[in-house]
Image (cartoon, rainbow, N blue to C red):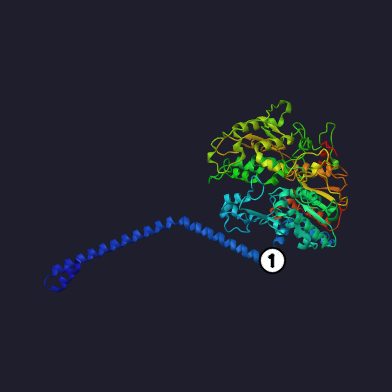
Amino acid sequence: MSFLRRRKATKNNSEDPQIDTASKNDDAVDNKKQKLHQKHEGEESSRRRRSSSRRWTCVDSCCWFIGCICSIWWFLLFMYNAMPASFPQYVTEAITGPLPDPPGVKLRKEGLTALHPVVFVPGIVTGGLELWEGHQCAEGLFRRRLWGGTFGELYRRPLCWVEHMSLDNETGLDSPGIRVRPVSGLVAADYFAPGYFVWAVLIANLAHIGYEEKTMYMAAYDWRLSFQNTEVRDQTLSRIKSNVELMVATNGGKKVVVIPHSMGTIYFLHFMKWVEAPAPVGGGGGSNWCAKHIKAVMNIGAPFLGVPKAVSGLFSIEAKDVAVARAFAPGVLDKDVFGLQTLQHMMRMTRTWDSTMSMIPKGGDTIWGGLDWSPEGYFNCSAKKLKNNDTNTVDQNGKGGLGSTKRVNYGRIISFGKDVAEIHSSKIEMVDFRDAFKGSNLINATKCDVWTEYHEMGIEGVKAIADYKVYTAGSILDLLHYVAPKMMARGDAHFSYGIADNLDDPKYQHYKYWSNPLETKLPNAPDMEIYSMYGVGVPTERAYVYKLTPPSECYIPFQIDTSAEGGSEDSCLKGGVFSVDGDETVPVLSSGFMCAKGWRGKTRFNPSGIHTYIREYNHAPPANLLEGRGTQSGAHVDIMGNFALIEDIIRVAAGATGEDLGGDRVYSDIFKWSENINLQL
């Protein structure tokens, strides 16, 4: 409109001055409106920008935070790679003072050099396993580690991992279409996971005095299998025999020093019987094979007589740490947010591993104690370990000199209720469960992800177990046969847990007895030495207080009662677990008894009089974080980095004998406890 008015005004400029004035006023109004509109649009745009800025503040902050973390990480990584190799040691020594030389460096300065070839025998779970054949869910995992390493596949596809780590529930061998095999070489068990050493520290120290791969051999095996089945499937025992013979032949006839750890100690005990037994069941090496090829067997953390922890693992897939986790976050392990019944899957998997049954306590009540006695008798869980076993005293009542005034019924490996664990056996009403009826009326078992043998027991069977109230080592076998008959049927074919009356009975030639030191003889090798080397001073699981689990879907009906406490600071009962002296996994009694008494001198278990030595290592935790897992640890796996233990091994490998080491070194009451065991020798 203003444009038309301007044209008209231009045309009639001289004719109508009033129209020209009006036209100018209209232009001013329009300009003012336009400026107001532009101002309004500017304010709106500014408001939108401020709103947008507020909306993305959180995202921007996260991006900045992640960027800063990544930048710092890469800077530190650059600095770590750029700094001199000696810088971490310089910092550590600046804080803690000069560090002692590692044992290998120290002994090299003394002039020790490699002499006897060394054989390592790893224990349960520490050896790597890799996939050679699998189902479709394991696509891309050929020759990738399923056990050991980073455990990456466990997180990405847990059910597939469980499927491939399980064995056949009937045969105890591979499931159809699956082949998982042990990793070979020293890398099989040098590290369990990145940064978590097993044999690596010992290997490095042996290398300091001249050892290398041709004089060291890792006797890796599939630790899930029964001992005899490692030969049936993989010919592992034959491979160990051949490698030992080769190492002796290529090292000037020098005998080997064998170093088994944990379950590897009873696996090698089985091997020593197998190698001398006639073929085809045995290796056909003859009765003098061990005498010709083995200088010493240096057992580390040996569960010679089994471990109570194996019972809780088979019974309720628990140990102390799992029980604490269940108490802290009830229901998380039983059925987590993804609906995965974790403990049930773990129970189903581990009950297919026959090796776990090799560590059920052996010797029954004679070794482990009955309802009202145990070899350990009185034990003060807070007492500081004495420096010499000879200083221990025994009073007129047979009470140990560690200062405790309250007897712990360690013989009651499983008790249903704290009161049952403590009162005299005459006050316990026990209802026999062995012939109890098993029903099938478990609560709402239709939604189960995995079926366990507990689903075949029914509520009646569960109640019968709890009504028996207390179980010793003698009745534990009946308990496991009742709750897991399929598992124990396989176990009975490969393992035995008794005490031989007559070791010359032909039945003891069967391989099921070979890993039980109470049902077999040591080889005829009088010049061989056997060491039992283990940590002491760490509370170790010995007995448990159980309770019934509240019924729910697919539940495991029994669990450790973490509310059961001893009532005093120095009590041996904490969180439903009775503790005793040991290395956190194996009680002293299991590791030390055979070398303290069963094999000491010429006995029916050691007819040739092989020399035996006990070497205990008093546990001292690391003083600070810079020490890592410590150089004086007595814990079951961490002891593999114990400088004193490594020094003992290197000295023997370099030619020393047990007498050269100083004979026995004992801090615990193992000799006194052994005398409390009435065993025919």
Drawn side of residue 415 relative to residue 363, left or right: left
Residue named by callout 1 = 84
Mark 1, other Cα within 10 Å: few <14 / some 14–19 / many ≥20: few
Q: Which quadrant is the N terminus positioned in?
A: bottom left
Q: Secondary structure at mark 1?
A: loop
Q: Which quadrant is the C terminus positioned in?
A: top right
Q: Residue at x 57, y 49 (%)?
A: 159
Q: Nearer the viewer, residue 268 or 285?
A: 285
> Which image quarter: residue 80?
bottom right
> Which image quarter: residue 92?
bottom right
Drawn side of residue 296 relative to residue 151, left or right: right
Q: Is residue 489 above or below residue 190?
A: above
- Residue 619 seen: no
Expressed as whole percent of the image width and height from the top left, the position of residue 175 reads 62, 50
Q: Residue at x 61, y 51 (%)?
A: 176
Marks counted in the figure total 1
Q: Nearer the viewer, residue 226 or 205?
A: 226
- Residue 371 seen: yes
Expressed as whole percent of the image width and height from the top left, the position of residue 186 reads 72, 59
Residue found farthest to the front = 280
Mark 1 residue type = Pro
Expressed as whole percent of the image width and height from the top left, the position of residue 472 reads 73, 34
Q: Is residue 350 above or below residue 17?
A: above
> Which image quarter: residue 563?
top right
Expressed as whole percent of the image width and height from the top left, the position of residue 622 reads 72, 51
Q: Nearer the viewer, residue 332 or 483?
A: 483
